[in-house]
Image: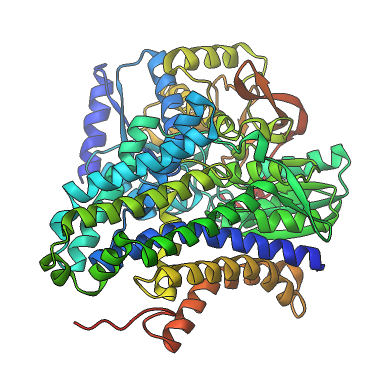
Amino acid sequence: MSVILIVEQVLNGLQFGVMLFLMAAGLTLIFGVMGLINLAHGSLYMIGAFAAAATAEVTGSFLLALAAALAAAAAAGAIIEVTVIRRLYAAPHLNQVLATFALILILSEGTRWVFGSFPLFLDIPDILSGTVTLPGGIQYSLYRLILIATGFAIAIGLWVLIERTRLGIQIRAGENDREMIAVLGVDISSLYTLVFALGAALAGLAGALVGAIQSVQVGMGEPVLILAFVVIVIGGIGSIRGALVGALLVGLTDTLGGVFLPEIFKVFMEPGAAQRSGSALAAMGIYVLMGGVLVWRPTGLFGVRRCI
Amino acid sequence: MKKLLVTLVLTALSATGTLSEVRVGMITTLSGGGAGLGIDVRDGFMLAIKQSGRDDIEVVIEDDQRKPDIAVQLADKMIQSENVDVLTGIIWSNLAMAVVPGATAQGTFYLSPNAGPSLLAGRGCHENYFNVAWQNDNLHEAAGAHANTAGYRNSFILAPNYPAGQDALTGYKRMYDGALAGEVFTKLGQTDYAAEIAQIRASGADSVFFFLPGGMGISFLKQYADSGVDMPVLGPAFSFDQGILQAVGDAALGVVNTSQWNKDIDIPVNAAFVESFQKEYGRLPSLYASQGFDTANLLLSALEVANPSDMDAFRTALRAADFASTRGDFRFGPNHHPIQTLYAREVIREGDVYTNRIIGVALADHADAYAGDCAM
């Protein structure tokens, strides 16, 4: 277990974390501002990946593919908000869960209908493929480094948006007191559509970026969705800062746990069994983390107790 | 009572020479993540039925959504209210384990076009259960045998942490003679393999064996190709079938994988199958499509001899496996699992389509390791 391997795994954890952040940021914004549980967030991730793969296939340009992913996911988000979600703000959470679960099924089968059942091809652009040598002789994938940088850049961009712009003030006000900002003359319904589309665009971007190193297929969003929910519960619902910290914690716990727990188990177990039980325990790692955080801070790391 | 009545009616019908209908139930995965496999099996199966020109065979097709509970419901419905004589179609081992024992115990024949869990080949074998594809371990054993041929002495092996994944590594190790540089179980459905690839890089292995079916394999191969690790990779055909290769692209070129079938097996029946499949569906067949096609042809060959209502005669006819398989020689072992030749294939590019070509025989005339446990 060399230092190089450990550093490499930490980078892997960071990369996983920032991609989770892109998903979780939208989810937490939507929940924070509108009080809506959006299970279809994973479908927006899938839409982004499919839009990117289809565009890359036609144009051959990765940048255009990313733009298409952003546009398609934002458009899908806006349409979903206007046609379905808008009717659900006053409804109990269970109705929201049911309706957005139905959206998952509709969007998955719709995507299959358009693109077929076989996975699509989306690859890293040539200029970003291959590895770079970092100080200390660590070979690391250039594309993954770019993903880490992109994720942090978007985190900073979101922070500026929320803390330093007029739109950000409205979003924060909407989180605190919906009725009051409506009374103050803010067009609450277009604000909701905008926030939903923004969250959707972030999910779509994550789908496209990750789709280039994974498989673009129907149903790719749901596993990520579950992790994104874990992230926002850990970080505190409604908090962008919490989403970033939570995502990095989950990314690092998951990656490092998967690598090091089996190694630790090998100290006192036969290798095959250590591998199996270590992997099984590592798969639980993030949920143990979530449980621990909730015991310590029931509203999550950066959650605020709401006055109702 | 109802079944007896149906049997009587069927016997009466066939006795009077009237056309008696055979009902086949196909439960397969047509939606969700693994739908490509089910669609290929269904298309291969239906192609053979169509080519037979028989209009007295009715195939009832239902989607199990890859969920064991739904598969069980469908099987009950098909057996009890649709009165199917033969069930087939299931892709996944966990679904097969949920459906097959119950179905065969109720006197329905089950022909497996894909899943071959070890329990159904060994202690849990049944006289009404026939596997037309392979026992799950077979392709991995072939990979282990190929690793010996290729001179690999230090393999790094990985598979998802679930029964079929554990069977895969067991199968590989059963035939492979060298040492292990590492053995890793990943999460089922995992899409990011950066951590495992870093371990591979640090392990000093001379080869990598992996079993990651479907989307997991696509992710692994793309990330492996981008990681700069260049030791040879090998695996079973499940990550290199016709549906997946196009999504992996150049990253798969030259990778050796093992299969019981390939489109270049040079026999007339296979050439005709590949050509007619391509003509009918506008895409190259995968190994799953060939398995669906073979399953239907096995069924058709048995129907020539006996009606499923005459269970003993029909079973004997199935056991004879008197049909022209797309993979050449095909026969059943004592546990109704195939004894067949397994090939090593290499991923190549033909024009702008990625496909496989056979580079050699990995295991000739190979039976499974569980036949001895089967008391039939």
Q: Is residue A126 above or below residue B265?
A: below
Residue A32 percent coordinates (x, y): 30, 68
Q: Is residue B163 above or below residue B283?
A: below
Question: Which image quadrant is residue A242 in?
Answer: bottom left
Residue displayed at 71% across by 29% down: B345
| Quadrant of the frame with the C terminus of chain A | bottom left
Side (left or right) of A57 relative to B182: left
Of B308 and B279, nearer the camera is: B279
Q: Is residue B68 above or below residue B129?
A: below
Of B170 and B132, nearer the camera is: B170
| Quadrant of the frame with the N terminus of chain A | bottom right
Side (left or right) of A99 relative to B65: left
Of B50 and A230, nearer the camera is: A230
Residue displayed at 33% across by 32% down: A113
Residue B251 percent coordinates (x, y): 67, 35
Residue A55 percent coordinates (x, y): 46, 30
Question: Which image quadrant is residue B86 in?
Answer: top left
Residue displayed at 17% across by 46% down: A83
**Observer able to see residue B35:** no
**Total tally of numbered discs in the picture:** 0
Question: Which image quadrant is residue A161 in?
Answer: bottom left
